[in-house]
Image (cartoon, rainbow, N blue to C red):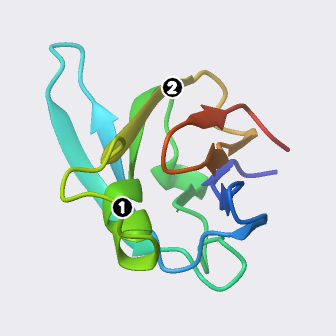
Amino acid sequence: MSGRLTTHVLDTAEGRPAAGLAVALHRVAEDGTRELLVEARTNADGRLDAPLLEGETLRPGVYELVFEVGAHFGSRRPTSSVPFLDRVPVRFGVADAEAHYHVPLLVTPWSYATYRGS
C-alpha cells in the first residue's frame, strides 16, 4: 500500500461541489517556512483529477492546503468588494506516509469546516 493525499471541496451554501476552486499545497518546515508543492483546481465534482501527493512524494511532516474561496465565491455571488473569507489555510500533520490522508473542505462565503476523511 502506498500513501496518498487527496482533497475535495463542497459548497454547502449551494449544496453542490465547488468546481474550479484553486488549491495549493505547501510543505511546512520546522522553522515555519513553506515550500509550494502543488497547485491545482477542483473539477466538476469538487475533487482534483489526481492525488496531491502519492507514493514516495508523501512524507511524514506538516503540510498546509490553501483554498482560494474568496475568488471562487466572488465569481459566483459577488456580495462585496472585500470577501469575508479569502484564502482558507488548513495546516495538518502526516504521521504515516503509507496511509491515505483525505482533507475535505466544506465551505460557504461565511464559514468552513474540515476533517480527516477516508
Residue 72, quarter of the rendered image: bottom left
The percent coordinates of residue 117 (x first, y second) are 80, 40
- The amino acid type of the residue labelled 1 equals Thr
Identify the residue at horizontal 39%, vertical 41% (top origin): 88
Viewer-side residue, 3 vs 19:
19
Q: How dense is the environment of label 1, judged by Cα within 10 Å: few (below 14), some, or many (20 and up)?
A: few
Q: Quadrant of the C terminus?
A: top right
Identify the residue at horizontal 61%, vertical 21% (top origin): 95
The percent coordinates of residue 45 (x first, y second) are 72, 78
Residue on which the image places disc 2: 92
Secondary structure category for the residue under label 1? loop
The percent coordinates of residue 98 (x first, y second) are 71, 39
Identify the residue at horizontal 72%, vertical 54% (top origin): 12
Any mark on residue 79, and which?
1
Identify the residue at horizontal 36%, vertical 43% (top origin): 85
Residue 47, quarter of the rendered image: bottom right
Distance CA(mark 1)–CA(mark 2): 31 Å
In the current view of this chain or complex, which residue is farthest to the top?
31
Residue 49, compared with residue 22, is above or below; it is below
